[in-house]
C-alpha cells in the first residue's frame, strides 16, 4: 500500500509538472491565423459585412457553411469554434493543457496494455520527452487553437477509437452506439491519421480472425461507421475544390522523396531504437508474439499516416502528428517490455533527458515570449484605437520567429497592407475598419 501510494503521488506530481509546462506555453501564445476567422459564424474565407459571433448553438450552421466552402473537417473545427466563442483564451489554455496530459496517459495505457507489463512511473516522463522532441511543429499542433483542434484533440478521438476496439467486448446496444460514434468521429477527424487508426484496428481484427476465427461486432460497426465519416468528410464540396490538382507521377514521386528526407532526418534515432529494443526484447524473451505484432501494427500505422500525404496538394510537417504518436506507442511498448520492472535505468534516462529538455525549453520559451509581447502590443493598439473612436490602427509587425515551438512560426500573421487577408480578419475581430503594419528597424 505504501509503494502504491508513493507511485500515485509521483505520477500526479509528474503529470502536474507537464500540465504546468504546457499551460505556461499556452498562456504565452495568443490567437494566430485562422483563429480570428473562427470567432465568427463561418460563411466564406473572406470577411462579410454582417458577421455573427460564434456560439455553441450556431456551430452546426457554421460548420455546414465550412463544409460547403472550405473543407470537411467539421469535427476538428467544431472544437475550435467552441473555444473561440469565449472572450478569453484562458478556457482553451486550461482544457488544452489537460488534453495534452490525456494524450500522455493514452500512450502510456497502450504501452502497458499491449506489452502486458505493469505501469512504471519512471517511464511516464520519457513519454513526455518523446512528444516534446518529436512532435513536429509543437507550436502549431499543440499551442495554436486551430492547430490543436485539428491535431492534438483529434488524436484523443482516434486513440480512444483504437483502445475501445482492443477490448473485444460483447456487442450490446450501448457498446454498439459507442462504437458507431467513435468510428464516425475517427473517420471524420482528418484525412490521414484517422484512416491510419482504422487500418491499425483492421490489422488487429485480421490477427484475431486468423488466430481465433472470430470477428468482434463492435469493431466491425466502428470500422463501417469510420468509413461513413471519412467519405462524408472527403465528399465536402470545399475539400473537392481545394483538392483539385493534377496528380502526376512526378508530383507524387517528389512528395515521396520529400517525405523520405523528412522522416529520415527527424526519426532515424527512433527507428534505430525500435529495431534495437525489438531485437533485445526477443533475445531476452521479454516480449510476447502479441506484443511484437502490436509494435508492427503501430509502425505500419505510422507510415500509413505519413505516406498518405503524398496524394495531398501539400504536406506540412504538422500533418504528421498522428504518425508520430503511433511511432511513440510502438517505441514504448518495447520500452515497457524491457524496462517495466526496472527503476534505476528509466530514472537515469529521465534525468538525462530532463537536462536536454531544459536546454531545449529555454530558447523555445524565449522565442515564444518575444512573439507574445509583440502580439500583445498589437492587441493594445487595436483596443486603444477602438476606445478612442479611431477607424484605423497602424502597428509594428512581428519579427521573424525562430522556434518550432512557437505557434507563430509557419502561420500567417499581419502584413503591411491593410488589404492583406490577416489584416482584414483581425480588423473584423477587434471591431475596427483597417489595420496596417510596419517593420521596425
Image: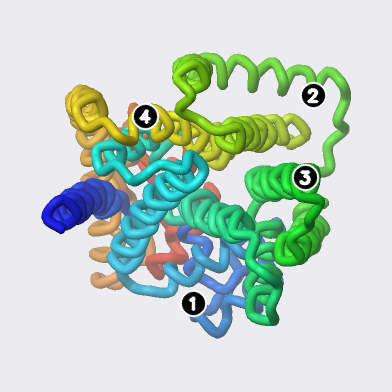
Q: Nearer the viewer, mark 3 or mark 1?
A: 3
Q: Secondary structure at mark 3?
A: helix
Q: Quadrant of the N terminus?
A: bottom left
Is 215 displayed left or right of 333 in the figure? right
Whether label 4 touches label 2, CB < 8 Å: no
* Image x and y of residue 372, in percent: 25, 46
According to the picture, the residue beneath numbered tag 4 turns out to be 133
Instruction: Give the mark nearest the N terminus, 4 or 2.
Output: 4
Name the residue carrying label 3.
206
Mark 1 = which residue? 53
Residue at 21% from the left image edge and 45% from the top image edge: 373
* Residue pointed to by mark 2: 252
Determine whether, in the image, residue 213 is placed left or right of residue 114: right
Whole-angstrom CA distance, mark 3 to mark 1, is 48 Å
C-alpha distance separating marks 1 and 2: 41 Å
SS state under label 4: helix
**What is the CA distance from the residue labelled 4 to the residue labelled 3?**
34 Å
Q: Earlier in the sequence, mark 3 or mark 1?
A: 1
Q: Earlier in the sequence, mark 4 or mark 3?
A: 4
Q: Position of residue 356 (x, y in %)?
A: 23, 23
The reply to whether discs 1 and 4 touch (Cβ–Cβ < 8 Å) is no
**Left-right relation of 167 to 28:** right
**Tag 2 or tag 1, which sits nearer the N-term?**
1
Amino acid at each position: 500500500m505504501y509503494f502504491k501510494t508513493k507511485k500515485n503521488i509521483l505520477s500526479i506530481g509528474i503529470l502536474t509538472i507537464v500540465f504546468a509546462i504546457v499551460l505556461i506555453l499556452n498562456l504565452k501564445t495568443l490567437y494566430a491565423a485562422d483563429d480570428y476567422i473562427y470567432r465568427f459564424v463561418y460563411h466564406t474565407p473572406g470577411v462579410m459585412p454582417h458577421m455573427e459571433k460564434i456560439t455553441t448553438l450556431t456551430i452546426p450552421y457554421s460548420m455546414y457553411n465550412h463544409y460547403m466552402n472550405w473543407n470537411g473537417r467539421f469535427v476538428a473545427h467544431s472544437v475550435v469554434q467552441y473555444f473561440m466563442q469565449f472572450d478569453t483564451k484562458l478556457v482553451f489554455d486550461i482544457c488544452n493543457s489537460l488534453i495534452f496530459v490525456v494524450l500522455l496517459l493514452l500512450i502510456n495505457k497502450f504501452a502497458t496494455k499491449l506489452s502486458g507489463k505493469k505501469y512504471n512511473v519512471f517511464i511516464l516522463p520519457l513519454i513526455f520527452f518523446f512528444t516534446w522532441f518529436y512532435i513536429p511543429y509543437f507550436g502549431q499542433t499543440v499551442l495554436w487553437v486551430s492547430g490543436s483542434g485539428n491535431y492534438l484533440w483529434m488524436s484523443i478521438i482516434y486513440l480512444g477509437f483504437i483502445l475501445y476496439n482492443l477490448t473485444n467486448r460483447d456487442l450490446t446496444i450501448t457498446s454498439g452506439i459507442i462504437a458507431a460514434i467513435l468510428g464516425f468521429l475517427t473517420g471524420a477527424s482528418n484525412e490521414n491519421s484517422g484512416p491510419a487508426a482504422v487500418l491499425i484496428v483492421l490489422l488487429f481484427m485480421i490477427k484475431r480472425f486468423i488466430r481465433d476465427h472470430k470477428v468482434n461486432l463492435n469493431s466491425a460497426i466502428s470500422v463501417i461507421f469510420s468509413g461513413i465519416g471519412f467519405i462524408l468528410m472527403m465528399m465536402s464540396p470545399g475539400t473537392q475544390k481545394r483538392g483539385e490538382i493534377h496528380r502526376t507521377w512526378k508530383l507524387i514521386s517528389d512528395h515521396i522523396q520529400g517525405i523520405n528526407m523528412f522522416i529520415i532526418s527527424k526519426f532515424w534515432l527512433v527507428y534505430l531504437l525500435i529495431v534495437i529494443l525489438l531485437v533485445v526484447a526477443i533475445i531476452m524473451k521479454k516480449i510476447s508474439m502479441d506484443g511484437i505484432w502490436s509494435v508492427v501494427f503501430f509502425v505500419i500505422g505510422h507510415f500509413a499516416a505519413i505516406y498518405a500525404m503524398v496524394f495531398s496538394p501539400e504536406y506540412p510537417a504538422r500533418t504528421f502528428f498522428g504518425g508520430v504518436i503511433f511511432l511513440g506507442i510502438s517505441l514504448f511498448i518495447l520500452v515497457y517490455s524491457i524496462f517495466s520492472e526496472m527503476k534505476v535505468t528509466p530514472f537515469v534516462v529521465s534525468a538525462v533527458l530532463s537536462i536536454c529538455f531544459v536546454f531545449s525549453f529555454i530558447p523555445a520559451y524565449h522565442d515564444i515570449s518575444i512573439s507574445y509581447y509583440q502580439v500583445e502590443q498589437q492587441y493594445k493598439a487595436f483596443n486603444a484605437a477602438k476606445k478612442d473612436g479611431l477607424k484605423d490602427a497602424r502597428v509594428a509587425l512581428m519579427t521573424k520567429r525562430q522556434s518550432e515551438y512557437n505557434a507563430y512560426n509557419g502561420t500567417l500573421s499581419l502584413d503591411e497592407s491593410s488589404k492583406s487577408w490577416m489584416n482584414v480578419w483581425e480588423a473584423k475581430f477587434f471591431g475596427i475598419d483597417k489595420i496596417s503594419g510596419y517593420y521596425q528597424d
